[in-house]
Structures are given as C-alpha cells and as structure tokens.
C-alpha cells in the first residue's frame, strides 16, 4: 500500500499557534487559464493534477461547509511531506448537499473522523456519503464551553473569553491525549484517505492537524 503520511507527534506545538489554524479571511486566487468557474473549483482532485498541489488550491469549496481543506504538501519535521489526496480537515458535515457528498466520494475518502461531543452530534448529525466509515472520537472540551462563549458574546457573562479558550485547548493535552493517540493510530494503521472534523474545523481539528 502507499504510505499515507509521516507521523511526528513527539512534539506538540504551543497552544494557540497551530500551523493549521483556520484563516477566516482566506483568499482564493485562481488563474483563469486553469479554472474558469466556481463549479470547477469545487471539483478539483488534487492528487490527480500537480498543478493544483499548491497553497492557492488548498481550500475545498462545498455548499454545506466553510472550512474544508486538503492537507497535502505540508512538510514534516524530518523533511518529508504529507501526500496529496489522503488527509482532509473540515468543519461539521451536517449540511452537505448531494453534490457535496458526490464530490467527497470522488476524492476517495474512506474514513470520516468526528471529534464532536455527543450533544453536538445530536443537534447536527453528519451526512456521511455511501462507502465511508464513520469513526467517533468525541472530545467534550470544546463543545462544553460553547454555551459559555455564546453567553459572553451576548453580554450575559463577563468572563474572559481568551482565558476560556486557552483553558479548553489545554484540555486537549491534559485530558484527551488518548483520543488523539487513537486518531493517529487509526491513520497509521488503516492507511486510508481520511477526513477529520469538529464543529468549526478550528480547535479540535486544528490540534489534530498540528500533531499529525
């Protein structure tokens, strides 16, 4: 089988400094001689075309997600690179359109790994395309603080939002290292193209991307 990825989880990057932190203002610059329409952007198959194996084409445009990305090409500590077409990061998959599901299937994804809490999954269950295995590795830390964050944003709680987020991220290391170990072992043992996600595709999924 083709090696999926070179793992290096011996060193965890500083909290809040993940190389894979989502860029909310991501700009997608498209050479017109390569892609002429939004529909074609959505149907890019990176592993089949080296022209698309660049940072400009990393974001995957779907109707039902906002933060789906191809993780090929990132360098590992030992100088190797993540293969294109084998690892994807995303926000929740509960709003996928039929076209979205068909496109994800065309990418060859075999595993969908969900880091969301039980409440989050109950509220917004994933729409899993046929033929994909659904793997649940719940991390409650981020989901548990959501009501507090929402209360702060509404002005109903005067706590420090920054401190709250740091506390939640610290739990990834102190409380959920077993979950991330299972995540890495799943990728290494199965050697199958996989998509992993949480609700927004930032903290829990971002931490997973950073240690892979």
Image: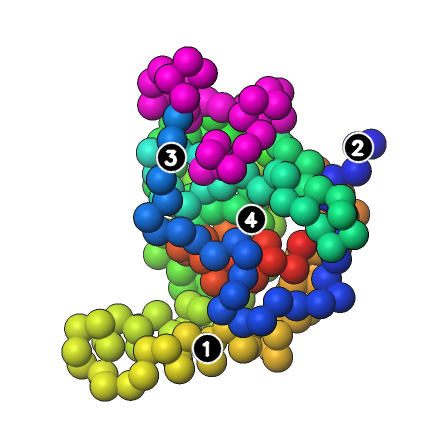
SS at mark 4? strand
Tag nearer the camera, 3 or 4: 3
In three-dimensional space, the C-alpha distance between marks 1 and 2, rounded to whole angstroms, equals: 38 Å
What's the distance in space between the residues labelled 3 and 4, CA to CA? 22 Å
Query: Quarter holding the C terminus?
Result: bottom right
Task: Single out the mark in the foreground, 4 or 2.
Answer: 2
Mark 1 or mark 2, which has the lower sequence index? 2
For the point 45% across and 42% down, the residue is: 68
Rendered residue at 61%/74% (across/down):
173
The structure residue drawn at horizontal position 46% and vertical position 22%, both measured from the top left corner, is 43
Look at discs 1 and 2 and give the one toward the viewer: 1
| Magenta segment boundaries in residue numbering | 31-59
Residue most extreme to the bottom: 158
Residue 205 horizontal/vertical position (percent): 52, 56
Q: Quadrant of residue 96?
A: top left
Is there CB contact under 8 Å for labels 1 and 4? no
Answer whether residue 204 is visible to the viewer in this image: no
Residue drawn at x 41%, y 18% as measured from the top left: 35
Q: Are the two marked residues, 1 and 2, in contact with CB atoms closer than 8 angstroms?
A: no
Mark 4 and mark 2: Cα distance apart in space: 20 Å
Identify the disc placed on residue 2.
2
Q: Do the residues bearing badges 3 and 1 touch, measured as CB atoms within 8 Å? A: no
Alpha carbon of mark 3 to alpha carbon of mark 1: how far?
30 Å
18 vs 73, left or right, is: left
Q: Examine the structure image and report whether residue 57 is included in the region drawn in magenta.
A: yes
| Mark 4 or mark 2: whose residue is earlier in sequence | 2
Q: Are marks 3 and 4 in contact (CB under 8 Å)?
A: no
Can you see residue 163?
yes
Picture coordinates of residue 167, whole percent (x, y): 47, 80
Q: Earlier in the sequence, mark 1 or mark 4?
A: 1
Q: Circle 1 is placed at which residue position?
A: 166
Q: Is residue 166 above or below residue 202?
A: below
């Amino acid at each position: 089988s083709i090696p999926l990825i070179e793992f290096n989880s011996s060193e965890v990057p500083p909290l809040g400094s993940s190389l894979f932190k989502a860029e909310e203002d991501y700009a997608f610059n498209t050479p017109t001689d390569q892609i002429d329409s939004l529909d074609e952007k959505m149907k890019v198959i990176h592993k089949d075309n080296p022209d698309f194996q660049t940072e400009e084409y990393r974001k995957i445009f779907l109707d039902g997600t906002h933060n789906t990305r191809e993780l090929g090409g990132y360098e590992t500590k030992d100088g190797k690179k993540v293969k294109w077409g084998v690892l994807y990061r995303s926000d929740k998959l509960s709003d996928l359109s039929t076209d979205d599901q068909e496109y994800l299937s065309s990418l060859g994804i075999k595993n969908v790994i969900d880091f969301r809490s039980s409440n989050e999954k109950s509220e917004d269950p994933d729409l899993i395309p046929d033929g994909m295995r659904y793997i649940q590795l719940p991390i409650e830390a981020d989901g548990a603080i959501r009501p507090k964050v929402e209360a702060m944003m509404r002005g109903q709680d005067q706590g420090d939002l920054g401190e709250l987020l740091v506390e939640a991220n610290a739990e990834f290391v102190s409380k959920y290292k077993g979950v991330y170990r299972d995540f890495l072992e799943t990728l290494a043992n199965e050697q199958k193209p996989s998509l992993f996600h949480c609700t927004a595709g930032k903290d829990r999924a971002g931490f997973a991307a950073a240690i892979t």
